[in-house]
Image: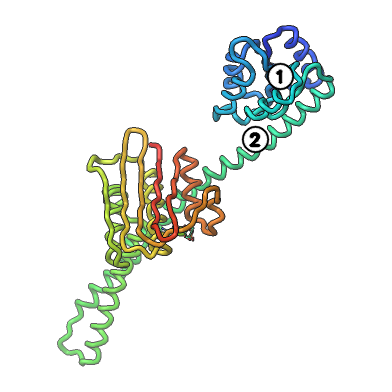
Amino acid sequence: MKKILAIDDNPANLQLIFAILNADFPDCQVLLSQSGSEGIEIAKRESPDTILLDILMPGMDGFEVCDILKRDIFTQHIPIIMVSAMNDSSIRIKGLNTGADAYMSRPFKREELKAQINVMLRIKFAEDRLRNRNEKLKNLYFELTIAEEKERRKIAEYLHDGLGQTISIASIKLSSIARGELSPAVKKTLDESAELLRNAINESRTLVYDLSPPILYELGLIAAIKWKLDQIEKKIGVITEFRFEENSIALKTDMKILIFRMICELLNNTIKHAGANLITVEIRKNAQSITVKVIDNGKGFDLRQGKALSELGGFGLFSINERLDALQGSMEIDSEPTKGTRITLTVPI
Ligand SMILES: Nc1ncnc2c1ncn2[C@@H]1O[C@H](COP(=O)(O)OP(=O)(O)O)[C@@H](O)[C@H]1O
Ligand SMILES: [Mg+2]
């Protein structure tokens, strides 16, 4: 059931509004409050769909109430109609600038109140739907990482236990062949085949690690990052630095995976786009959160203030941001052409 909250210190005003709303919005529950501070309490508790707010009230006035409600993440999306006998444009402007969504001066026509509330309910409905979808989308990003990781692990296990074992056995059998009577040509082919199998074993090991590093599960985040940086040094020839505190970072598996994958994404970006010769990863942890920094001395990029991540063209940074948002974390990007890139992720734990 939709709810409308009216806040007004004057009982006669409240009574009138109550009577009108009950008649015009029979499907809505009407809540009343005679003071700003109580009104805020009710708004937090009941999440009304629209608030009618008087301006002149003893104690907390309507501007202050509006300001508090619009700053609070639990109430900021509730449309507010400011109502006052003052019909002065500077008051209207102040009200709207404080965050009110509409302004009505008393005395008003009943029809006007009805129309105005209908507008607010429409806005609220559309916004709720949008927020709801947004929320679902964010959770989806999170779920996606976990689902992807499960698949990766499954394939890695199959590679390791199935294919890897088969090749190993083939390799052992091949090397056990007695070679005394064999012609040089056959011997050569055997040696080449053994070499190919050894390569296949090595490649499948690397693949297993790339897909789902067992280190992450067995030894944790720090060890997995060390391994990843080591790989980058060996394969790409970039110098890496890793700074972290020795105190062991106990994290839930999902969290470990999420953070590890985000770091990998940032490292891949550095390899792909930065042309850097030094990459630094830094991890700090306190009781509330983990802070991860990935810093490179590469060519940087232009992320002007206000430019949305989705406008960069890629999906990597955007999806890191969405995943962090779902966890109430944050990402800060500090980059400028020729000045390198420094990305800071903060993840609450
Ligand atoms: N470390 C970096 N150095 C230079 N440019 C970067 C770096 N990280 C990201 N970028 C720029 O930001 C863009 C968006 O990155 P991202 O969202 O990961 O998408 P993608 O990697 O698929 O292009 C990249 O195309 C690149 O231009
Ligand atoms: Mg990328």
Q: Residues within 10 Å of mark 2 (few under 14, many from 20)?
A: some
Is residue 107 visible in the rendered image? The answer is: yes
Q: Residues within 10 Å of mark 1 (few under 14, many from 20)?
A: some
Is residue 151 shown left or right of residue 210? right
Q: What amino acid does circle 2 point to?
A: Asp
Q: Is residue 267 above or below residue 44?
A: below
**Would you identify the image quadrant in which residue 120 lies?**
top right
Mark 1 and 2 residues: CB-CB less than 8 Å, in contact? no
What number is the disc on residue 128?
Answer: 2
Q: Position of residue 56 (x, y in %)?
A: 67, 14
Is residue 1 visible in the rendered image? The answer is: no
What number is the disc on residue 78?
Answer: none
Is residue 20 shown left or right of residue 51? right
Q: Is residue 309 above or below residue 198?
A: above
Which residue is pictured at 55% across the width and 51% down the height? 307
Quadrant for the N terminus, please.
top right
**Circle 1 residue:** 29
Report helix, strand or loop for mark 2.
helix
Name the one closer to the observer, 28 or 276: 276
**Would you identify the image quadrant in which residue 313 lies?**
bottom right
Q: Earlier in the sequence, mark 1 or mark 2?
A: 1
Residue lying farthest left? Answer: 180
**Would you identify the image quadrant in which residue 337 lies?**
bottom left
Is residue 231 shown left or right of residue 77? left
Q: Is residue 94 above or below residue 258?
A: above
Label 1 near ligand 1 (CB < 8 Å): no
Which residue is pictured at 71% across the width and 7% down the height? 11
Residue lying farthest top? Answer: 11
Q: What amino acid does circle 1 point to?
A: Gln
Q: Position of residue 31 (x, y in %)?
A: 68, 16
Q: Position of residue 176 (x, y in %)?
A: 19, 77
Which residue is pictured at 35% across the width and 66% down the height? 163
